[in-house]
């Protein structure tokens, strides 16, 4: 009976999400059509949209199950996260993996009625297990962006030296893509190939900034575009930018060392309740089971978990100093 309630809830929830996403997609398409008609009426010419010339991971016109997933706003966000993580997955594959990972959570939640009741526990455990594939993608994305950030000052020095030697900016980009190690070399190769295929420099740099969402990359694109419009010594600008980035790395290291105590405190406070619970389960197996069986005890367990997550979130926000 409880499994039937959980399945019914998930089906109704999925249908509501599908209806809302289809409605939003329809309204967005109608708004874009109205804007395009107004622009065409004002200019008297068809509107030409400049897009990315490089091949995306997903097909331009997905069919079947991919078309259903593309109607959700999360599909676009997931595709962006996957691309920035350097993975060859598709948004459909990630969402499917999340859906499959929710199945064990439903079973565990229906079996272990820890939170309030069976359906509530099943839904919460399903959300937790279903988010694991997404968290893996986020971890790989963060690791890749950290590597890109470490490589970027050397790449700017390479561009500056190449331009001082007399090479053009596009040729320097090609040389950088061939000489620089991945993942930054891969991104500069994509930047050069996109420009080489005929895309304007502004479009290629904007796509490069979207693929590598780093503050240093935005500084680089702004410097290149500003130099193109106003003139100046681009090699000197890139050299000074590389120096500023390295100084910011040094300051970030000092901030990280100063906040080490806070990060250690956050880790201990997050692991201490879990370790205490495991110790009580080993030493006194029946101690926590009575609390989980009581209705008020279930509310207390849920509140403790929520307070633990909220406290850890605020500690992370306090010690996360932007440099």
Image (cartoon, helix red, strand yellow):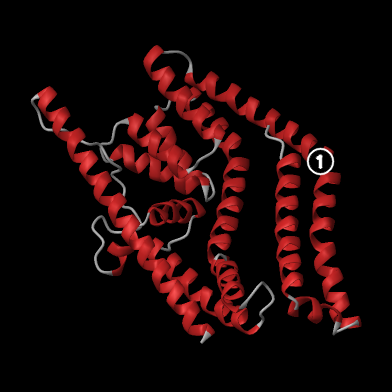
Helix, strand or loop under label 1: loop
Please indicate whether residue 268 sits to the left or right of residue 6 in the image: right
Q: Nearer the viewer, residue 322 or 15?
A: 15
> Which of the 4 image quarters holds residue 75?
bottom left
Q: Residue at x 73, y 35 (%)?
A: 252
Q: Residue at x 38, y 32 (%)?
A: 170
Q: Residue at x 47, y 59 (%)?
A: 87
Q: Residue at x 44, y 24 (%)?
A: 224
Relative vertical location of residue 37 with respect to residue 281 in this rendering, above or below: above
Neighbor class of circle 1 (other Cα within 10 Å; few <14, some 14-19, many 20+) is: some
Please indicate whether residue 265 sits to the left or right of residue 66 in the image: right
Q: Nearer the viewer, residue 80 or 277?
A: 277
Relative vertical location of residue 178 with respect to residue 17 in this rendering, above or below: above
Residue 204: where, in percent of width, then height? Answer: 36, 36
Residue 38: where, in percent of width, then height? Answer: 16, 29
Please indicate whether residue 154 sits to the left or right of residue 36 in the image: right
Please indicate whether residue 136 sits to the left or right of residue 112 in the image: left
> Which of the 4 image quarters holds residue 171?
top left
Name the image quarter holding the C terminus: top right
- Residue at image mark 1: 259
Q: Nearer the viewer, residue 198 or 164?
A: 198
Relative vertical location of residue 110 with respect to residue 99 in this rendering, above or below: below
Residue 53: where, in percent of width, then height? Answer: 28, 44
């Amino acid at each position: 009976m409880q499994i039937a309630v959980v399945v019914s809830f998930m089906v109704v929830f999925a249908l509501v999400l599908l209806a809302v996403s289809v409605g939003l997609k329809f309204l967005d398409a109608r708004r874009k059509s109205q804007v395009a008609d107004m622009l065409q009426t004002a200019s008297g010419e068809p509107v030409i949209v400049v897009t990315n010339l490089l091949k995306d991971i997903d097909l331009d016109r997905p069919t079947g199950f991919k078309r259903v997933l593309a109607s959700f706003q999360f599909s676009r966000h997931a595709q962006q996260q996957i691309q920035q993580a350097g993975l060859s997955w598709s948004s459909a594959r990630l969402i499917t993996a999340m859906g499959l990972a929710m199945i064990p959570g439903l079973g565990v939640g229906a079996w272990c009625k820890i939170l309030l009741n069976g359906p509530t526990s099943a839904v919460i455990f399903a959300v937790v297990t279903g988010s694991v594939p997404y968290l893996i993608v986020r971890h790989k994305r963060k690791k890749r962006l950290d590597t890109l950030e470490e490589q970027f000052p050397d790449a700017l020095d390479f561009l500056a030296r190449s331009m001082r030697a007399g090479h053009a900016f596009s040729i320097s980009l090609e040389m950088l893509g061939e000489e620089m190690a991945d993942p930054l070399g891969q991104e500069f190769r994509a930047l050069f190939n996109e420009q080489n295929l005929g895309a304007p420099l502004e479009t290629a740099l904007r796509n490069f900034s979207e693929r590598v969402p780093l503050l240093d990359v935005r500084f680089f694109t702004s410097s290149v575009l500003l130099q193109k419009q106003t003139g100046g010594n681009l090699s000197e600008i890139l050299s000074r930018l590389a120096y500023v980035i390295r100084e910011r790395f040094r300051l970030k290291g000092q901030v990280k060392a100063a906040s080490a105590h806070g990060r250690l405190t956050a880790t201990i406070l997050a692991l201490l309740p879990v370790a205490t619970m495991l110790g009580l389960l080993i030493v006194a197996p029946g101690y926590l089971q009575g609390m989980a069986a009581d209705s008020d005890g279930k509310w207390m367990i849920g509140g403790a978990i929520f307070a633990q997550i909220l406290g850890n979130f605020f500690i992370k926000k306090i010690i996360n100093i932007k440099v």
